């Protein structure tokens, strides 16, 4: 799968996708993203992408933030540790982020977007958030955190002022003894700068001295009397601060589980919205997933190419045609077309939008690729060897529900032998029943595609006047390499062209081969060339094939006989490939209609038990009573546990469960008589 992602440049798509996510958990989920084989799950993932894109367009960018480090703080609080003011302030920011996201999703609910109902799973913890905001400010405990703390800090300020006043009074009385006019704080003591020769004139405690030793910093005795009082006040302040921190830490620990659920929900929403942001970046559309083995793309683009210069691709495969052989000139866009089709299918099956105007795509058990030369000097693999290794791996894993793409089929070796191998590979792919898309320059492969049922040719168009490819695919027609034509227009001498044509087409057809630029002349060569033709029709579909081994022995191989050294697929051991899990038609609608008031249900992904208080509405959303709250939730995230008729009698009054005592009493009163000014309030 990793090699397929690299070949199709899905790794680059993932890199762009990763940039759209904010949390580490979402980033890890993106890195691990792969093909979804469950039809039901894939439909849900595509729906999430579409709804997130709608939210982005109607409500703007969601206020998601990375809550990295929050779980470590919660763990410390749950262990009974005292959190620091900085950690508490970080927690307050996390609660604010949850509230902002909840408000954002509320706006989405007003737009009728089902994704916004995830808001019901976010617990803003407003009281705790307000308490933190009130008691923690700017990385420290606020003066207003408690009355005692405010009093103590006021007493500390007054004690410090009295100490300074006493110190300044001593300085004024002994100006001639001072080396400076200002008092200073040394080791928590208020000190005055005294000249060394007057140290015995000033009554006090020596605290410090200058680097030269000429100035002594002395705490006057009059100021020292307040120091002990100040220290006691500071100890009391520290104890009060610690008490507040422990109290807040305990509150955070009590609400730790709710915050962990908030974090999980924010990570999930971050992943979902990252898909919507990625879709916005290339203006993607939701593909329609179909059960038939068919691929249809209208105006498809490669998502990594500039849409201003990328020529849209019109593509259709299926409906009796399982394989397409693409031919055309070099740099004509054949490989881009391959990658666009395969990458679109891969992205769709990962739950992503694809860059097109319309798409119908079938699910595939796997997508198998052979793109690039695959040379590996460390493993002693040449281009041809690498291709064969990839091809054999593909044939081991191919199934009728696979999509296979191969670039330059049979290349990297002798053209005649490469052509034979290419035809053998196509034959095996045809037998497998898989959908496949290959490119080639071999005229014999084009001929094979023309006569074989279920395989068609396609060509990439080329502007002969301006010598530039047009990057448009025409299905049903074989293409030309245009090599001689391009060489002639670029100034290759006619003598060289004739020599090349003689080698390619024989003496009789060289001029015609030059004129037609390749494919038509090659057809004539196959009809008239002597000794070079590798295949000859014997009649009634029977073919006599030659190979290098047979040529050396001077004989042809009989039909079905394998010559020495020939390419053989017999005995190739198939590898296990996971199957696609098809959705059972009608299950979701049946389940949605089966929910009744009073049903006991399990709510996913939290696996909480609740009771249905309002059945499914036209948007597929029902209301469930959970402990302490009622939530709106999609029926797809609810599973029936016990039906209401098994839990309650037919005439059971559900207001006992879903209504408040006050409302029930008032309702009974209103049923008996008119109650002026009475109003029943329900929580919506």
Image (spheres, grey):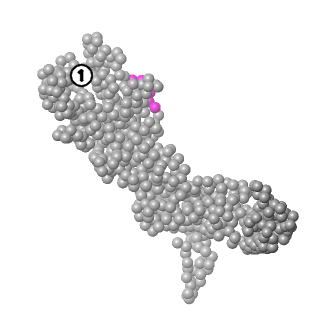
Image point (28%, 24%), residue name? 415
Taking the image as shown, residue 584 lies to the left or right of residue 523, namely right
Q: Secondary structure at mark 1?
A: strand
Residue at the top extreme of this rendering: 553
Residue 477 image offset from top left, x and y in percent: 21, 38
Residue bounds of the magenta highlight = 569-575
Residue 281 image point, x, y percent:
39, 53
Q: Is residue 469 magenta?
A: no
Q: Is residue 219 above or below residue 536?
A: below
Residue at 17% x, 40% y: name it: 465
Left or right, 223 with respect to 256, comes to right
Report the residue at 69% width, 72% height from top. 144
Indicate the position of residue 104 as horizontal and vertical percent values.
Answer: 49, 65
Taking 3 as reference, is 143 above or below it? below
Residue 84, above or below 229? above
Name the residue: 50% across, 56% down. 269
Residue 166: give x, y in percent of width and height.
80, 72
Residue 561, compared with residue 285, is above or below; it is above
Per the picture, the main secondary structure of the magenta-coloured stretch is: loop
- Residue 254: tell me if it is visible: no
Name the residue beneath numbered marker 1: 535
Classify mark 1: residues with Cα within 10 Å, few (<14), some (14-19) or many (20+). Answer: some
Left or right: 506 with respect to 414?
left
Residue 265 found in image quarter: bottom right
Residue 210: quadrant of the picture = bottom right
Q: Is residue 144 visible?
A: yes
Say how many tags the image has.
1
Closer-to-camera residue (246/140) = 140
């Amino acid at each position: 799968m990793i090699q397929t992602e690299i070949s199709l440049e899905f790794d680059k798509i993932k890199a762009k996708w990763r940039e759209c996510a904010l949390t580490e958990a979402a980033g890890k989920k993106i890195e691990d993203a792969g093909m979804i084989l469950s039809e039901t799950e894939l439909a849900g993932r595509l729906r999430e992408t579409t709804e997130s894109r709608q939210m982005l367009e109607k409500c703007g960018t969601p206020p998601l933030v990375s809550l990295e480090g929050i779980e470590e703080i919660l763990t410390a609080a749950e262990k009974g540790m005292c959190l620091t003011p900085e950690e508490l302030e970080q927690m307050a920011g996390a609660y604010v982020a949850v509230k902002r996201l909840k408000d954002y999703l509320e706006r989405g609910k007003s737009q009728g977007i089902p994704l916004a109902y995830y808001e019901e799973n976010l617990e803003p913890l407003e009281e705790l958030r307000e308490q933190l905001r009130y008691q923690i400010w700017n990385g420290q405990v606020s003066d207003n955190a408690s009355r005692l703390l405010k009093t103590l800090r006021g007493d500390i300020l007054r004690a410090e002022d009295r100490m300074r006043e006493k110190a300044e009074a001593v300085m004024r009385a002994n100006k001639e003894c001072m080396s400076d006019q200002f008092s200073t704080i040394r080791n928590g003591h208020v000190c005055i700068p005294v000249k060394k020769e007057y140290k015995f004139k000033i009554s006090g405690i020596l605290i410090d001295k200058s680097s030269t030793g000429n100035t002594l910093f002395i705490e006057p005795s009059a100021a020292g009397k307040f120091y002990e009082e100040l220290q006691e006040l500071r100890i009391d302040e520290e104890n009060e601060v610690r008490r507040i921190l422990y109290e807040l830490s305990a509150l955070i620990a009590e609400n730790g589980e709710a915050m962990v659920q908030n974090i999980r929900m924010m990570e999930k929403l971050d992943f979902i919205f990252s898909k919507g942001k990625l879709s916005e970046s290339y203006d993607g559309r939701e593909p329609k997933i179909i059960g038939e083995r068919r691929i249809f793309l209208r105006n498809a683009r490669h998502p990594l190419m500039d849409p201003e210069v990328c020529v849209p691709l019109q593509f259709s495969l299926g409906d009796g045609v399982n394989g397409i052989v693409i031919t055309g000139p070099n740099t004509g866009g054949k490989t881009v077309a391959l990658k666009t089709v395969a990458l679109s299918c891969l992205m769709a099956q990962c739950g992503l939008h694809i860059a097109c105007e319309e798409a119908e795509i079938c699910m595939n058990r796997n997508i198998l690729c052979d793109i690039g030369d695959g040379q590996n000097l460390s493993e002693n693999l040449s281009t041809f060897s690498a291709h064969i290794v990839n091809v054999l791996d593909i044939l081991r894993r191919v199934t009728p529900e696979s999509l296979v793409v191969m670039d330059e089929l049979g290349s990297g070796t002798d053209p005649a032998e490469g052509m034979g191998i290419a035809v053998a590979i196509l034959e095996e792919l045809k037998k497998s029943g898989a959908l496949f898309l290959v490119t080639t320059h071999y005229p014999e492969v084009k001929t094979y595609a023309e006569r074989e049922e279920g395989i068609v040719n396609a060509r990439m168009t080329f502007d002969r006047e301006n010598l530039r490819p047009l990057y448009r695919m025409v299905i049903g027609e074989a293409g030309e390499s245009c090599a001689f034509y391009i060489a002639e227009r670029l100034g290759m001498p006619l003598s060289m062209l004739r020599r090349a044509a003689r080698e390619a087409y024989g003496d009789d057809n060289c001029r015609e081969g030059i004129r037609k630029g390749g494919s038509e002349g090659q057809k004539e060569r196959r009809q008239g060339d002597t000794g070079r033709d590798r295949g000859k029709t014997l009649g009634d579909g029977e073919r006599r094939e030659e190979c290098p081994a047979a040529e050396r022995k001077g004989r042809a191989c009989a039909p079905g006989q394998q010559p020495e050294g020939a390419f053989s697929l017999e005995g190739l051991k198939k590898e296990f490939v996971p199957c696609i899990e098809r959705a059972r038609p009608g299950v979701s609608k049946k389940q949605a209609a089966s929910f009744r008031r009073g049903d006991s249900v399990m709510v996913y992904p939290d696996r909480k038990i609740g009771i249905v208080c309002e059945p499914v509405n036209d948007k597929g959303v029902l209301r469930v009573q959970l402990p302490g709250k009622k939530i709106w939730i999609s029926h797809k995230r609810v599973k029936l546990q016990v039906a209401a008729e098994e839990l309650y009698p037919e005439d059971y009054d559900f207001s006992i469960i879903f209504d408040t005592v006050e409302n029930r009493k008032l309702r009974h009163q209103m049923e008996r008589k008119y109650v002026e000014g009475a109003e029943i309030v329900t929580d919506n």
